[in-house]
Amino acid sequence: MVTRKINPSTLPKPHGHAQIIVASGGTLVFTSGQVAIDPDEKLIGDGPDYRAQARQTAENVYAAVAAAGLTPADIVRLTIYVVDPAPENLEELYVGLGEAGAAAGAKSTAMTLIGVTGLSFPGAVVEMDATAIGE
C-alpha cells in the first residue's frame, strides 16, 4: 500500500492530522465505532476522564485494525465523536489520543471530530471509528 499526505497551502495548517491522505492498492478495513470499554465491558475513564477514554478508545480501534491483520500505522482516517467538545475536554482527548498513538506506532492521518449529545454506551464521552489500508 502506498499512502501520500497532502497539506496544501490553500487549506489551513493541520494540527496533528493530515488534510488529505491519498492511498492506492491494498486491502481496506473499516472499523465500527469503538468506545472506552475493556473486554469485560467495563468503562475506562468514568467521571468523565476524556484523556483516559480517548486512550482506551484508540487502543480499541488499534486492536480492531490488528484483528484484520493491519497495524495502527495503516490507519488513513479517524472519525472521533465527542460529548461536550469544550476546549478543555478536547485538550485532554488529544493528550490521550497522542499517548495511545505513540505507544502503538500510529501516524498522523486524516481526521474529523464531531460533537454529539450522547453515545451508545452509558458514560462514554469518546467514540472513534477508523479506515485502514494495508498490503
Image (spheres, rainbow, N blue to C red):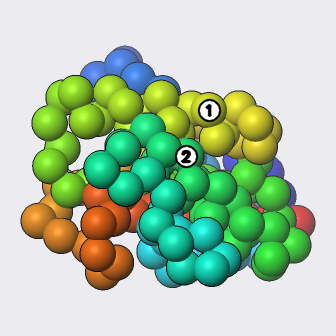
Residue at image coords 41%, 23%: 15
Residue 67 lies in quadrant: bottom right
Residue indicated by mark 1: 99
Please, is residue 124 above or below residue 21 in the view?
Answer: below
Q: Is residue 121 left or right of residue 58?
A: left
| Near-viewer residue (127 or 22) | 127
Residue indicated by mark 2: 55
Please, what secondary structure does the residue beneath circle 2 have? Answer: helix
**N-term-proximal mark, 2 vs 1:** 2
Q: Whole-percent x and y of residue 43?
A: 46, 66
Q: Is residue 75 left or right of residue 104?
A: left
Point out which mark residue 28 bears: none
Residue at image coords 52%, 40%: 97
Please, is residue 91 above or below residue 70 in the view?
Answer: above
Residue at image coords 18%, 70%: 118
Asked if labels 1 and 2 touch by Cβ distance under 8 angstroms, the answer is yes
Tell me, yes or no, if residue 131 can be seen here: no
Q: Amino acid at mark 2?
A: Arg
Q: Is residue 123 left or right of residue 80?
A: left
- Distance of mark 2 from mark 1, alpha carbons? 7 Å
Residue at image coords 61%, 64%: 61
Please, what secondary structure does the residue beneath circle 1 have? Answer: helix
Q: Amino acid at mark 1?
A: Glu
The quarter of the rendered structure image containing the N terminus is: bottom right
Q: Whole-percent x and y of residue 29?
A: 67, 76
Residue 103 lies in quadrant: top right
Q: Is residue 29 left or right of residue 10?
A: right
The quarter of the rendered structure image containing the C terminus is: bottom right
Q: Residues within 10 Å of mark 2 (few under 14, many from 20)?
A: many
Q: Whole-percent x and y of residue 72?
A: 73, 52
